[in-house]
Image: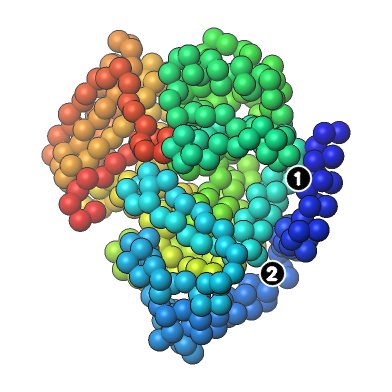
Amino acid sequence: MNGMIRRNFFWLDDKIYNNSLVKKQYDEIMYAFREEENLLTTWMQQRKCLLDHATQTTKFYSSYEGKSFEKFPVINKSICLENYKDFVSKNYKAQKIHRMSTNGSSGTPFTIIQDIRKRSRVIAELKAFMALRGLLPNQKMIYLDAMSARNKGKTRFEQWKENIWRVDISNLGRENVEDVIMFMQKHAGKLVLGYPSTMECIANYSTNDDRIKKLGIQTVITAGETLHSETRRKAKRVFGKNCDVLSRYSNQEMGILGQEKEEYGSYLLNHSSYYFECLDLNEDKPAKEGDIGRIVITDLYNYAFPLIRYDTEDTGIIGMDQNVSIYPVLKTVFGKKKDILFDCKKEPVIPDVIDEMFYGKDNIKQWKLIQKDYTKIRLIVNCNENGKRDVERICSKLKKHFGNETQIAVDYVDQISDEKGGKYRYIVCEIPGK
């Protein structure tokens, strides 16, 4: 009942003050999900309109007018920062804009401007991807977020209006986890959203505790980090076997890019809002079928700050999966390019191989792999005494995959701290140039 009141209030507010822009775009995205075969024509038209707009209204893209899409440069966050003013469309310099900032957890903070249509699109995407899980707009959701890292706390009225109840997870010690569980008991709905590392922390704390299971939460969606198989298994144990634990692919520069349709499945990509490419790790050419590549995205809706062929610095495999979509899907996302490790022959090691080594190891609470060069790996582990035997076996498997010349140094610690912004990196490559 409360969800319906908030939903009607939201759509009315959108109609009066925003010309129903969120509702129109929500309906567009939902239609694209239902009628995929009709999407291609719209998709190509949107891309052409964006290229025309960018070349005619921004200094950075002005020299590419009339050129084919493939001739446009692949850009990244650093290029945007170095040429910031040249990316801003002259049509929007005097208009109301929304500022969206990344938290800099990858080392480079970035604030991007979004025009009203793009901002409305982001909100519509959130509601549409929730609808894929059977959740109507403005139904209750718990959001476990590192609020202090970005100073993005909401007032109680704002949380009530959105029906998104936020709790700060910037510092998840034992007392803080207990507070989070009590918060979830007070505001329990059908969905919980948070980092995978947050879910793992809650699961480790709640090993013999069934309080969360009793809340009847239907879906847990994780975002911001790679969802490892072991983390998913632990979360299902705590939230209940009937609770789906899914991974969402998104970033703050753009919005929701894709989401798993089912556990361990491919990601349904948001083709109605973005154009996706998977490029070679080292060259700006398409990756070979089935190979790890860089995920490069064109935002079809942000006209204030056009992002064309934007290298997200994420890596993954994009291909076909007819069980999910008639268009390419994201089969796997591995996180940042700098989080790909390499064997002694300088070939990339698929992170899923490493993930599998730690699967089912309940005596290991936390782990992190850091590669200094092609033959040196540091394994940091938070585990009990029994877990040390698991670590020995894992090191043998690592040598098998990385090469017998590999030197593995193991550090046992009581706690592995999060990155800036509340995220947690399991795999870190520190090889110069990689």
Q: Nearer the viewer, residue 386 or 274?
A: 274
Q: Nearer the viewer, residue 131 or 243?
A: 131
- Drawn side of residue 432 relative to residue 317, left or right: left
Q: Nearer the viewer, residue 309 or 247?
A: 309
The relative height of residue 282 versus residue 251 in the rendered view (above or below) is below
- Drawn side of residue 232 relative to residue 378, left or right: right
Residue 300, image quadrant: bottom right
Q: Which mark is residue 39?
A: 2
Q: Quadrant of the C terminus?
A: bottom left
Residue 279 visible in the displayed image: no
Which residue occupies 19% across, 48% down?
Answer: 431
Q: Position of residue 47 (x, y in %)?
A: 58, 75
Q: Position of residue 144 (x, y in %)?
A: 55, 32
The relative height of residue 234 versus residue 2 in the rendered view (above or below) is above
The first of marks 1 and 2 along the sequence is: 2
Q: Gap in Å between the C-alphas at discs 1 and 2?
A: 23 Å
- Drawn side of residue 133 relative to residue 68, left or right: right
**Crowding at mark 2 (Cα within 10 Å: few <14, some 14-19, many 20+):** some
Q: Quadrant of the N terminus?
A: top right
Q: Nearer the viewer, residue 300 or 317?
A: 300
Q: Which mark is residue 152?
A: none
Label 1: which secondary element = loop
Residue that label 1 marks = 137
